[in-house]
Image: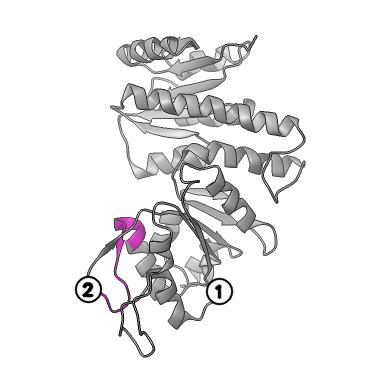
Amino acid sequence: MEQIKEVWIADDDKSIRWMLEKAVKKDGLKVRLFSDADQLIVALKVGNPDLVLSDIRMPGTEGLDLLAHLKKEKPSTPVIIMTAYADLEKAVSSFSGGAFEYMPKPFDVSEMMSVIRRGLRNVDDVEASIEAGGIKLPEIVGSSTAMQEVFRSIGRLSGSDMTVLLTGESGTGKELVARALHRHSLRADKELVAINAAAIPKDLLESELFGHERGAFTGADARHLGRFEQANGGTLFLDEIGDMSLDLQARLLRVLASGEFYRVGGREAVVTDVRLIAATNHRLEDRVDEGKFREDLLYRLNVIRME
């Protein structure tokens, strides 16, 4: 008989604990409640939750510190962070710290339960794959501790739509990881479009990314749809982003901020819904110091970094 999963909830708001307890039990799951993170940490010495929900702001140990403790002691346990004080910095901190998902309050209970189910299903899939000798991702193999952590990261990110920055030397498999991230994402039924910023001349890269209108320049005999439009609803993998020129970086920043762009020679804004995965073999902080990379773009890209 399959063992019933157990969800642990840490929140100093009694009404939130009550609401989540009722929903989790209705879904046929076990639940344990904690009014602060310190109680949960003590319980970890003898207990083993299948998934943890934690508020950020609580008396004593805060939620992000609890997340760090869980990632150290129970690295395969998915953690969902909740907060009434939602902002980009906390979202970045949560995902950078290894959170499975970040849920701003107030949230819809049915949506939360959907995230919980994904988290439980995800950890089952990842652990089963690891036990079988490696996650079942075509073209990627590896049994080292470092590769297992990459597999776990891919698994944890499967329910997220956040931007990912892949770093590492050329030839270490960044594009394979990007394809795995897409294949295990909510956008898997849409296109993954890849482009190498270092392989295309600067004057052509703008058109390749954003497209152009007929007559925009000599030889532009017809409208051309760029990679952002081709990837609409799916994922855009932008390789060697550290080699992109500063003016194109500015255009990319605007797209990430607003979800809109203009084709070369165009006057009408194009709206796009793209999950961006970027990769580089440069240390972008050094490129920023050298004046070759925009610091504000690095901040936008560096939501989740995978080495």
Left or right: where does residue 100 sit relative to residue 23? right
- Disc 2 to disc 1: CB gap under 8 Å: no
Q: Residue 291 got which mark?
A: none
Is residue 75 visible in the rendered image? The answer is no
Residue found at the very far left of the displayed protein:
267
Quadrant of the rendering where the N terminus is positioned: top right
Colouring used for the render: one colour
Residue found at the very far front of the displayed protein:
222
Q: Is residue 168 magenta?
A: no
Name the residue: 36% across, 63% down.
253
* Residue 6: percent from left, percent from top: 54, 14
Q: Is residue 259 magenta?
A: yes
Which amino acid type is shown beneath numbered disc 2? Arg
34 or 128, nearer to the observer: 128
Which amino acid type is shown beneath numbered disc 1? Ala
Is 145 above or below relative to 5?
below
Name the residue: 58% across, 42% down.
154
Q: Quadrant of residue 91?
A: top left
* Residue 72: percent from left, percent from top: 62, 30
| Pointer 2 residue | 267
Around disc 1, counting alpha carbons within 10 Å, would you say few (fewer than 14), some (14 to 19), or many (20 or more)?
some
Name the residue: 50% across, 34% down.
99
Of the image marks 2 and 1, the number of the one nearer the N terminus: 1
Is 188 above or below relative to 166?
above
Is residue 235 visible in the rendered image? The answer is yes
In the image, which is nearer the foreground, mark 2 or mark 1? 2
Which structural element holds mark 2? loop
Residue range of the region highlighted in magenta in the rendering? 255-267
* Residue 263: percent from left, percent from top: 32, 72
Q: CA distance from mark 2 to mark 1?
A: 28 Å
Which structural element holds mark 1? loop
Q: Residue 198 got which mark?
A: 1
